[in-house]
Image (cartoon, rainbow, N blue to C red):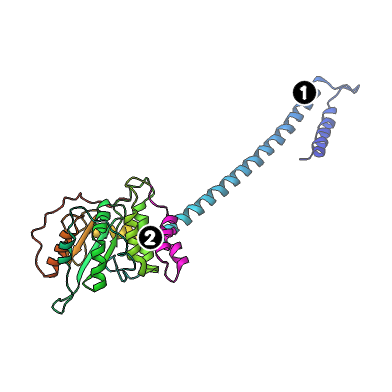
Amino acid sequence: MSSDDSTNALSTGDSASSEITSTGGTPTAAGRREAVREKAQQVQVRQSRARMVRSAAWITGAVVVVAAVAIVVGMTVGGAASKPQLSPDGTDHDGFVVTSISSAGSGTVTSPDDATPSAAAEATPSTTASTAAPVQIHVYVDYLSPSAREWQLANESNLSSWVAEGAATLTYHPVAMLTAKSNGTKYSLRAASAAACVATYAPASFFQFNSDLLKRQPAVDSDGFSDKDLADIASANGTGDEPKKLRECIETETYASWAKAGAERAVAGIEGTDGLSLTGNAMVLVNGQAYQGEMTDPAEFSQFVLTSASGKSAKNQTPTPTPTPSVTP
């Protein structure tokens, strides 16, 4: 109601009340009380209308906010539920076969002091006509595992030679077992995803990238490399034909869900073996047999490879105790 309308209403009320006057034009006491009552009623009506308008506006705003929140939550939940788990190209039982050793074996690899190079060389599998097939080596690697790093450093030179000579096939299975051991950054998971990206977009650089991640391994319970750092390491080793896609794949952690699921599958049971399952943060299989020797002794591992290549059972291995594994979220 406008001020003019209010004035008119009050004027009307005054006119009505003026009728209750004395014959001499002076309002009686009853007339004055009636006039005050009418004015009070008019003010009350205006206040009631104002409260109704404010209440309606508040209710409308609340409904809009609730509806907006419901839409956002629905889109988020629906998007997460419908997002497919992407899988990298060229996997072999969740692993990547090394197709090129690149320059991985050209660097200086420091072997343990107790390693015997001559013994390792004597145990190298041969690819003569009598050899039935190359030895199959499968490596389950968590890029935050000290044991995985020790094994890679000790055996990289021999691995490079065996693959180059066709004496062995080498397959790496990136697994995320220590995801909770990097201050919340999930480094193991991100590194495994990055390795899958390199295997997909720059397969010729995979072996070198894998080796670099282990050689430059962050300490357990540290943040680890950022996604950008991982992409930079990959670029330094060769980006293949699609460098932008490789970097985007690493920085968006495209294969993180795949890496987590792959670790869970390995813990449940390794396909193609006689009931084996992943029993540690680093595990090496040769022709389906688990290596249980010293991870830092290249001579011992070479002997195990030679024994496996000859078809003999490696019964004389001294098992190295490993903790019961669990895939951390």
Towards the viewer: 106 or 86: 106
Residue located farthest toward the right when viewing the structure as drawn: 24
Q: Is 231 covered by the magenta stretch?
A: yes
What residue is disc 1 on? Answer: 33
Towards the viewer: 121 or 26: 121
Three-letter code for the amino acid on which mark 2 is drawn: Ala
Q: Main SS type for the magenta part?
A: helix
The x, y position of residue 281, in whole percent, is: 25, 53
The x, y position of residue 32, in whole percent, is: 80, 23
Towards the viewer: 20 or 259: 259
Mark 2: secondary structure: helix
Residue located farthest toward the front when viewing the structure as drawn: 118
The x, y position of residue 313, in whole percent, is: 9, 64
For the N terminus, which image quadrant? top right
Q: Mark 1 or mark 2: which is in front?
A: 2
Q: Which mark is residue 194?
A: 2
Residue at 36% in and 52% down: 187
**Crowd tier of the residue under label 1, counting other residues whose Cα lies within 10 Å: few below 14, some 14–19, many 20 or above:** few
Three-letter code for the amino acid on which mark 1 is drawn: Arg
Residue located farthest toward the top when viewing the structure as drawn: 29
Marks 1/2: CA–CA distance: 88 Å
From this view, report whether residue 104 is shown above or below residue 324: below
Q: Is residue 243 left or right of residue 195?
A: right
Residue at 50% in and 51% down: 70
Q: Earlier in the sequence, mark 1 or mark 2?
A: 1
Q: Is 316 covered by the magenta stretch?
A: no
The x, y position of residue 280, in whole percent, is: 22, 53
